[in-house]
Image (cartoon, rainbow, N blue to C red):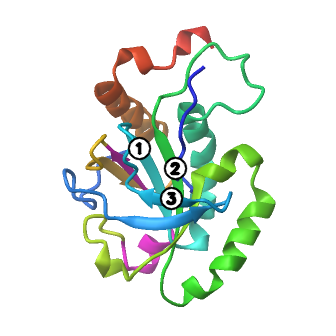
Amino acid sequence: MKQLILSSALLFCLAILGHAQIGEKYPSMSGENLLRKNVNLPINNGKVTLIALAYSEKSDEDLKQWRTALFDLFIQAPGTDLFDFDPYDGNVKFVVLLMGVNKIAAGKVKSKLEDGVKEHWKEHIVVVKGKNIDNYPSLDLGKAKKERIKPYFFLLDKQGQIVYATSGAYTKEKHNEIEKKLQEMIGDNQMKDKDKK
């Protein structure tokens, strides 16, 4: 089974957004995963990347719906060789973006996440002390309350350009769109063999 390098948090993607600027480079972000290792985004390792980004604690409900789906697409959990498929060979990161006064609480946020996350997830959850929302125009993160409480998802090509984006709650349609894009970018040989499940 192929190991997937997960480089995100809290997840979770995809009816095209009029939001993110498709074709633009994902902005540079630096953070630390729950294994206390530095992570730079976008990841430059020759693989596609799916980033699930949240900047409100209230987005957690929507993210929970995404976690299993993204896990199945990208991550091989320890002891799950019963499944006869390989995950996609790409990066996945769940990014917790802390801005403004929330940056002060970065240590507490990490500790809380570490306590509630299984070990094989920890490398994929990244806490970023970010800038103001206006510093990330290519992501078009919403400022209104209803926009802040939802997670955002960005599929990046090997060069770090945004090729697809969505936000909000999980739907089968969004999940299918992600798989369709992954198939186009990675090819049939990296697809999970769903018929063998």
Q: Nearer the viewer, residue 63 or 138?
A: 138
Gap between marks 2 and 1, in whole Å?
8 Å
Horizontally, residue 142 falls left or right of residue 130, namely: left
Type of amino acid under label 2 = Ser
Which residue carries the number 1 mark? 49
Tell me the element at label 3.
strand
Which residue carries the number 3 mark? 39
Q: Nearer the viewer, residue 45 or 105?
A: 45
Which label belongs to residue 167? none
Horizontally, residue 93 falls left or right of residue 19, namely: right
Question: Can you give x and y, in whole percent of width and height, for residue 79 in the image?
Answer: 78, 26
Residue at horizontal 56 percent and vertical 24 percent from the top: 2
Which label belongs to residue 7? 2
What is the residue that sits farthest to the top in this orientation?
Answer: 196
Question: What range is drawn magenta here?
Answer: 142-156
Residue contact between numbered discs 3 and 2, judged by CB atoms under 8 Å:
yes
10 Å neighbourhood of mark 3: few (<14), some, or many (≥20)?
many
Quadrant in the picture for residue 174: top left
Residue contact between numbered discs 3 and 1, judged by CB atoms under 8 Å:
no
Residue at horizontal 53 percent and vertical 40 percent from the top: 5
Question: Can you give x and y, in whole percent of width and height, for residue 173 in the image?
Answer: 42, 37
Gap between marks 3 and 2, in whole Å?
8 Å
Q: Nearer the viewer, mark 3 or mark 1?
A: 3
